[in-house]
Image (tube, grey):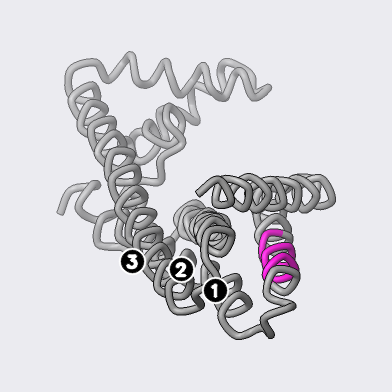
Amino acid sequence: MNELTKHETKRVQTMEEKLNTLRAGVLGANDGVLTVVGVLFSVAAATSNQFVIMIAGISDLLACAFSMASGEYASVSTQKDTEKSAVVTEQRLLKSDFAGQIKVVTDYYIAEGVSKQTATEIAKDLLAKKALATVVKIKYGIELGHYLNPWDAAISSLFAASIGGIFPLVAMTFAPADLKMIATIIAVTFSVALTGLISSKLGNGMVKNAIIRNIIVGLITMFIHYYVGQLF
């Protein structure tokens, strides 16, 4: 069994794989909230027929969820193909230019502050034990055998977009007639604040800025779609 095959038999997800799935979910949820509320406000501004509003919201929720899922699948599939192509390239280089690969690894450790002699010894030792895993990790940051899974991203995005869109849909559908708009605004504000919080935590960003940014975008989305709906 060669080195690549050994690594590809592993099934434990790396942190990068888990974060990619979570990222797809957060983006899907945020898009689900904003897309559905946009349609709801546009239709609600144009008609007071509750059935029409509900059907429009449900239709858009489903369209948004499947659109996000297909987009994530295509995007992550491309990234996975790129990663696999890089691995194949490094396999060829290890056969045709092993000395060059030793130099790449040596230079990497020298840049990390290791002396040239020690860096050379480390490089030779690593390439003697796990050559392919070492070079793809150093050159591309790829964990051999742990490619991003497009299905994980697609499914995460599908369910998250569906759940995100449910908040404004339920508020608009079931709130009392005179409170529908305010209830929907509150539901959307809560939803986008939550996705802002989660995304900032995942990216080690500034929580307050992410939440405020998402809320502002949500309010602008509702405002624009409401007045566009009134035009008709």
Disc number lying in front (2 or 3): 2
Q: Could you say where residue 60 lies in the image, as x and y percent from the top left? A: 40, 62
Q: Residue shown at 56%/64% (left/top)?
A: 44
Disc 2 on helix, strand or loop? helix
| Principal secondary structure, stretch drawn in magenta | helix
Decide which of 160, 8 is in the foreground and name it: 160
Left or right side of 207 for 20? left
Q: Is residue 122 above or below residue 28?
A: above
Q: What range is drawn magenta here?
A: 184-192
First in sequence: mark 1 vs mark 3: 3
Q: Could you say where residue 29 lies in the image, as x and y percent from the top left? A: 54, 62
Q: Residue shown at 53%/22% (left/top)?
A: 108
Left or right side of 203 for 131? left
Q: Could you say where residue 17 lies in the image, as x and y percent from the top left? A: 45, 55
Residue topped by disc 3 = 11
Q: Which amino acid lies under the numbered mark 2 shown in the image of this protein?
A: Gly
Residue topped by disc 1 = 169
Q: Residue shown at 55%/68% (left/top)?
A: 164
